[in-house]
Image (cartoon, rainbow, N blue to C red):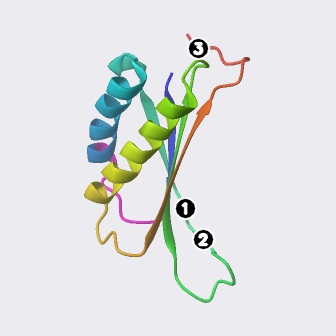
Amino acid sequence: MPQITVDYSAPLHRRGFASALHPLVVDIVDTELDACKTRFREIEELIVGDGSTYDVIVHVEIALLFGRTDAVKARLSEAVLDLLPKYLTGADGVRLSVEVRDLESSYRKR
């Protein structure tokens, strides 16, 4: 925990983004740096709306153990949205989104 997934179709400096994201998460949600795990999934094809334009996205999902307030989750979402453009090549026109959610009660780790 936190489990972080980044879906992207834009040119993203993955290692730099994760290296900046992890301390940000630690600071806002009060967790340990070694607990942060980020995986990246490149999107091969993306269609937005009627598909008449070429669109690119970056969507970050952060799953946390239950107990963070909605205000903390919102603060983290905003901070991630502010951080993302710094790690994109040509950030103009990129659709950015962030979701911070609770992990399911079945979550386990070793």
For the residues labelled 3 and 1, the Cα–Cα distance comes to: 27 Å
User: Relative to 73, does residue 30 appear above or below in the rendering?
Assistant: above
Q: Position of residue 32 (x, y in %)?
A: 36, 16
**SS at mark 3 in the image:** loop
| Residue, far bottom | 52
User: Relative to 97, does residue 70 appear above or below in the rendering?
Assistant: above
**Residue positioned 35% across, 74% down in the render:** 92
* Residue 109: mark: 3
**SS at mark 2 in the image:** loop
Confirm whether the magenta stretch covers residue 13.
Answer: yes
**SS at mark 1 in the image:** loop
**Label pair 3/2, CB-CB below 8 angstroms:** no
Q: Amino acid at mark 3?
A: Lys
Q: Which range of residues does the magenta coloring cover?
A: 9-15
Secondary structure mostly seen in the magenta stretch: loop
Q: Amino acid at mark 2?
A: Leu
For the residues labelled 2 and 1, the Cα–Cα distance comes to: 7 Å
Looking at the image, which is closer to me, 36 or 49? 49
Residue 13 relative to residue 80: left or right: left
**Label pair 2/1, CB-CB below 8 angstroms:** yes
Q: Position of residue 41 (x, y in %)?
A: 52, 51
**Residue positioned 43% across, 38% down in the render:** 75
Q: Position of residue 94 (x, y in %)?
A: 43, 69
Upstream in the sequence, badge 3 or badge 2?
2
Residue at the disc numbered 2: 46
Residue at the disc numbered 1: 43
